[in-house]
Amino acid sequence: MTPPGPADGFRYADLIPATDFLSVLDDAQYRPVPDGWWVAVTDVVDSTGAIAAGRYRAVNYVGAAVIAALRNALGRRDLPFVFGGDGASVLVAPGEAEAARTALAATVTWARDAMGLSLRAALVPVSAIRAAGHAVEVARYAPSPDVAYAMFMGGGLAFAERALKQGLHAIAAAPEGAQPDLGGLTCRFEPARARNGLILSILVVAAEGADRDAARAAIADVVRLAAEAPGKGHPLPPGAPPLRWPPAGFAHEVRAHGPLRGSLALRRLQVLGRTLLAHLIFRFGLRLGGFSAPRYLDELVANADFRKYDDGLRMTIDCGPDLAARIEARLQAAEAAGLVRFGLHRQAAALTTCITPVAALRDHVHFVDGEDGGYARAAQALKAKIPVTIPVAIPAEDPARQTGRDPVRGRAAGESGGESARAAV
C-alpha cells in the first residue's frame, strides 16, 4: 500500500527520527497532525483487576493486538503508534478510517470471545481534538537504525483517551466470530529477570497549570537518572530474554491465529509445530535464507520499545534499588513543587510482546512492560493523586446526547468512568 500523503502536506514517514531520547522533549522535533487524520485509541476495561488475577501477559497481548490488527489492515506500513501496556493509540490517515474501524471492531470481538477481556475502542477525529483546544503533534524516535517509534505532544492523545473512557466516538464490537488479522503477533519469550535489582515502571506527566519548561526539566532529569543504570537501564539482557518450549504465551498465540470456530485441537497442533520449529532455530542459532537467529535476537534488544513520550514519559528500566530511590526522590520533589504527577511500580522482571510480520526483515518491533502490571499499576498510583475528572466537551450533534448520556460527564447514569494516567491530566 502506498503511504498516505502528501495531499494534506503531511507524511509521517518523512519525519526525520531523533536518535537521542532526550530530544523527544524538544518541541522542535514535533509536527502537527492535520485535521483529516484520526486517533484510534483503546484500553482493556478493568486491566487492574485482570492483572491482580495474574493475567498481565494477556492484558499486554491484547494491547499489542490492536497495533498488529491496524498495521495488517492498513498494508503493514509504518504506522505512528504508542503501546501503553493495557491499550494503544494509533494515528490513522485520511481515507483509512473505515478500514481501521473494521479492524478495531473485529479486535474488540476477538478480545472478548478469545481472550475473555473487555476492550474499549474509539476513533477520534483530529479535527474534534483541535476544536476542543488540544493538539496532536508527532515525532519519531529511532532506538536502532531499523525501527522508529512515534512520540506525541500537545495533549491530543490524552483528550482522545478521556473521550474513549466516556463512550464518545466508540467502535462497537463486530459480530460474533469476527477475527482480526493478527499475523506477526507473538508472545514467546520468557520474562526477563532484573539483572540489577528490579524492573521499574515509570509514568510522569506535567501537572495541570505547571510551568512548561520547569516540568520538562524535571522529566529530563528522570531520563538522565535512568541512563545511569547499567546498559542505560535497558530491561532486556544482551542476546534477548530466554526462550522455552512450549512458550509461556502459547495459549494466546493459539487464540490469535486462526478462526475462533473450528477445531481447537488442530490449531493447537499447528501452533505447537510452528513454535517448536522457531525454538529449535533459535536454540541452535540457525541461518535460513535471509533469516539469521543470532542477528534477530540482537535486533530484538536494539529495537525494544522500553521508553517513550506520549503526553508524558513512560519507561520500563532495569536498575538497582538505590537508583530507583533517587528517581523517586527527584519525582517527589518535582511533584511537591507542583510540576509533575507520577506513578512508579517495582517488580522482578519485564515482559516482551513482539510483532514480526516478516522474520527475515529487520523492522520487527518489541513492546516491553513490567511483569507485574508495570504501566497499568504505575497508572493506578498516578490516578490516585488526581481525584478530579476533567470532562470532555460533547458537541451538540454528538449521538451520545441522544442515548441518555450525561452531557457534562459524558456517560450514562451508573457507568463507571475511571481515568488512565494520560487521560487524568
Image (cartoon, rainbow, N blue to C red):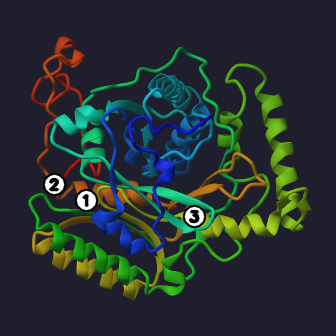
Q: Quick check: 3 left or right of 159?
A: right
Q: Name the amino acid type tagged 2.
A: Ile
Viewer-side residue, 398 vs 54: 398
Mark 3 highlights which residue? 304
Check the image and report above or below for 180 versus 284.
above
- The answer to whether residue 242 is seen in the rendering is no
Q: CA distance from mark 3 to mark 1?
A: 25 Å
Label placed on residue 361: none
- Amino acid type assigned to the residue bearing label 3 in the image: Ala
Q: What residue appears at the point 66 percent right and 34 percent down from the top-left corner?
A: 255
Q: Secondary structure at mark 2?
A: loop
Judge by depth and name the residue closer to the eye, 58 or 126: 126
Q: Position of residue 31 (x, y in %)?
A: 34, 53
- The image quadrant that residue 219 belongs to is bottom left
Mark number, residue 382: 1
Cα–Cα gap, marks 2 and 1: 7 Å
Residue 119 placed where, x, y %? 44, 33
Residue ID at (47%, 38%): 5
Q: Quick one: label 2 or label 3, which is nearer the N terminus?
A: 3
Q: CA distance from mark 2 to mark 3?
A: 31 Å
Badge 2 vs badge 1, beta-carbon distance below 8 Å: yes
Lower sequence index among marks 3 and 1: 3
- Residue position for label 2: 386
Position of the N terminus by quadrant: top right
In percent of width and height, residue 95 lies at 46, 26
- The correct choice, above or below, for 219 with respect to 164 in the image is below
- Secondary structure beneath dot 1 equals helix
Q: Secondary structure at mark 3?
A: strand
